[in-house]
Amino acid sequence: MSEEKKQFAELKIGDKSIDLPIVIGTENEKAVDISGLRKTTGYVTLDPSFMNTASCYSSITFVDGEKGILRYRGIPIEELVEKCSFTQVAYLLIHGKLANPEERLKFSKLLNQNSLLHEDMRHFFDHFPRGAHPMHILSTMINALAVFYPNVDLLSLDEDIDLSAARLISTVRTMAAFAYKKNIGEPVVYPRHDLNYCANFLNMMFDSPVKPYDIKPEIVKLLNILLILHADHEQNCSTTAVRTIGSAQVNLYATISAGISALSGPLHGGANQAVVEMLDMIVADGGDVKKFVARAKDKNDTFRLMGFGHRVYKTYDPRAKIIKSECHKLLSTMKNKDPLYEVAMELEQVALHDEYFIERNLYPNVDFYTGIVYRALGIPSNMFTVMFALARLPGWIAHWKEMIGHHTKIVRPRQIYIGKVPADYGK
């Protein structure tokens, strides 16, 4: 944009005024660039929890919460779910384009070749206490990768992003399955060269010396969809953590470990587990949905309905639309009906027709359905957040790569000090 066509917002402070550049994104998003504000005026802006602050430029993911739009690299999530595998979407996020047949074959080979853990690392699992949460095991193990593969910094990644990304995406899948086996006290299952990414993960999770796992194509397809839906979602808490820590030029694996730690919280990655626990509680109480809806509306009651509403989406979450349909398909074919699903469907009807929910834009979000689907696949609730981390890896890597490519300065927010004023020592 030429200097003549630039737009500015005028800010007046006392008898002074300053022109702040207006930045317009490719989807017509508008922002006021305040990067020079403090230098010019001595003022900073205050925006707790970054509710109204854009922290970076990015060309990876576009989210429109008012219209219910989600696109990766410009491609609608609906098309990606229909036409792509998770590994194809991973390549798209990291490289900015869909792989051609030659690139796809090369990436698949790298994923296969790097699916094994270093054998010394495998023995680490023997020293975690039985019953340790798989998410904590995963975070620790990824941090340990920095010791076994130390040269994964911004210089090496420029030359070998394919290998570094493939090693991380593939080994984390193996770690996740090993963590689950450790948690339940079963022997680990090694990856197989003849299985694709999602089929391999399911086999490592559920195969057993005494009960071989039957890999069903429809379940593999469903897992691909689940992972694609969570592959990226703009500047959420964990992605912001990755960008913040990565800005200090931290090793990629240590940076991703920090993202996993951020994701492990109940308000971020733990949301679908919280939904299942809530549904369990309602079923155990007799299944009276109206009772719990009334409690959710009561300002004096601490109970919350989990899986409704979203910080960004003010309409139906596009990911929820997709997984709702898949959830219906899956559960309609199951012989044993899940009582949690029946309660969930009743809650959904309330949310879609009750004025209290409609006025507050409390539509069922993606977490509302994914927990039920993972449960139907046989994945236990303490693995839900691990599945989220597995899915989000390509997005984190893409943001890390984009961030270092822009030569970002180390992140260093300002603050407004509200503590004590200078005082003599001892007073």
Image (cartoon, rainbow, N blue to C red):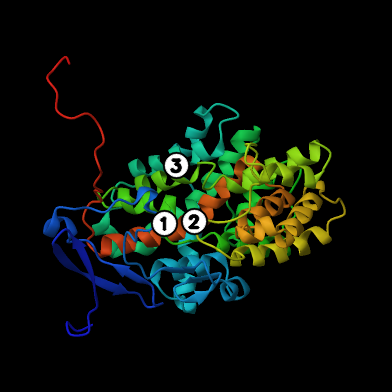
Q: Position of residue 369 (x, y in %)?
A: 68, 55
Residue at 67%, 63% (x, y): give it: 323
Question: Distance of mark 1 from mark 2, alpha carbons?
Answer: 6 Å
Q: Amino acid at mark 1?
A: Trp
Quadrant placement of the N terminus: bottom left
Relative depth, front residue between 400 and 1: 1
Element under label 1? helix
Which residue is farthest top?
A: 426
Question: Distance of mark 3 from mark 1, alpha carbons?
Answer: 13 Å
Element under label 3? helix
Q: In the picture shown, does residue 174 fall above or below 159?
A: above
Q: Amino acid at mark 3?
A: Ser
Residue wearing tag 1: 396
Q: Residues within 10 Å of mark 3 (few under 14, many from 20)?
A: some
Which residue is farthest right?
A: 335
Residue 77 in view (yes/no): yes
Question: Distance of mark 3 from mark 2, alpha carbons?
Answer: 13 Å
